[in-house]
Amino acid sequence: MKTNKTSIPVALTIAGSDSGGGAGIQTDLRTFAFHCVHGTSAITCITAQNTLGVFRVDAMPSEAVIAQIRAVVEDIGVQAAKTGMLLNQEIILAVAQEVRTLQINNLVVDPVMVSRTGAQLIDDDAIQTLRHELIPQAAIITPNRYEAQILSGLEIVSLEDMQNAAQIIHKNLGTKAVLVKGGGMSGGLKGVDVWFDGERLEILRTKQVETKNTHGTGCTLSAAITANLALGKDLWTAVQEAKEYVTTALTYSLDIGKGQGPVGHFFPLLEK
Ligand SMILES: Nc1ncnc2c1ncn2[C@@H]1O[C@H](COP(=O)(O)OP(=O)(O)O)[C@@H](O)[C@H]1O
Ligand SMILES: Cc1ncc(COP(=O)(O)OP(=O)(O)O)c(N)n1
């Protein structure tokens, strides 16, 4: 039988594993697959996690992270990449070095530092390294409310605060574009995001989805942006379409586990 040779864009996620399948590598690969992009991965840490929380985190040796990135990039090649939970300073430095040396373009940095509930996930040294070594190489960074507060030095409670933070982060950190996410905002701002690329300050509004099952929204959004970049879309289009995707995935969120379930990535299949 003759086989079809399929050409497909490739994306890389450099992130942690979530045993519960709601965030991290598992979510990123599902999002890539939904977009018909071949997903590759470099795992930075293993979390024992479910819908109730994170119970243990084991870091991978930084050499192992480097080896995974090189194995993928040197053979397969990637059109876009994202980073998620990088955990510690050594891993962040290693990733920043590899991104530079291998000239990985279309880099989306989801600066996973603080959970949506406000708990800090990485130490202060690691935050400084992320700020100075990795973020300047990004096409876009996607901080949530608390991460944007750390990166801008502003307290964020209003839309104006989100807009100011996006502009400060853009000016100070050297990334091409910033998307401040509003999942952690209250009232009418939940689900409202702010984009700034040095010229355009835009507000991305969608309907607010009433669900407790929002685990993995940040990972899903950044992975969808990455997939869209791998497909050749420009950054602004990639962000707008990713925002629509995460909103729809939220409306199909999965009621699994006793806590905060994940979003539903394959919503057309769930309708069957
Ligand atoms: N209840 C909701 N309704 C609509 N959009 C939401 C909701 N919760 C989060 N989002 C959106 O999900 C994306 C991820 O944002 P956020 O939850 O703030 O990130 P993180 O998961 O990194 O904390 C953003 O586009 C945000 O606006
Ligand atoms: C392994 C791992 N990586 C990232 C996260 C955080 O996920 P995120 O989508 O940014 O945040 P929530 O929407 O789940 O708050 C994680 N929990 N685990």
Image (cartoon, grey):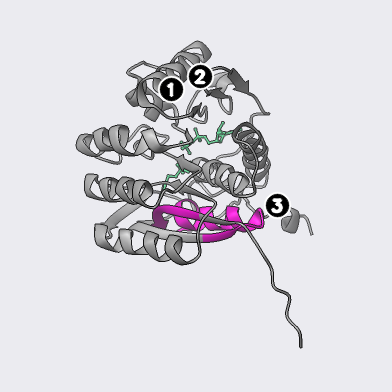
Q: Name the residue under label 3.
A: 267
Check if residue 26 falls in the magenta segment. yes
Residue found 29% across the figure and 55% down from its top: 57
Question: Spatial distance from mark 2 to mark 1, Cα to Cα?
Answer: 7 Å
Q: Mark 1 points at which residue?
A: 170
- Front position in the image: 46 or 13: 13
Q: Can residue 191 be seen in this view?
A: yes
Q: Name the element at disc 1.
A: helix
Residue found 26% across the figure and 46% down from its top: 93
Q: Which amino acid does label 2 sit on?
A: Gly
- Front position in the image: 17 or 171: 171
Mark 2 surroundings within 10 Å by alpha-carbon count, few (fewer than 14), some (14 through 19), many (20 or more): some
Answer whether labels 2 and 1 touch (C-beta < 8 Å). Answer: yes
Q: Name the element at disc 3.
A: helix
Of badges 2 and 3, the one in the foreground is 2
Q: Mark 2 points at which residue?
A: 198
| Residue 121 sits in quarter | top left
Q: Name the element at disc 2.
A: loop
Question: Spatial distance from mark 2 to mark 3, Cα to Cα?
Answer: 35 Å
Residue found 25% across the figure and 57% down from its top: 62
Q: Which residue lies furthest to the top in this view?
A: 160
Mark 3 surroundings within 10 Å by alpha-carbon count, few (fewer than 14), some (14 through 19), many (20 or more): some
Check if residue 63 falls in the magenta segment. no
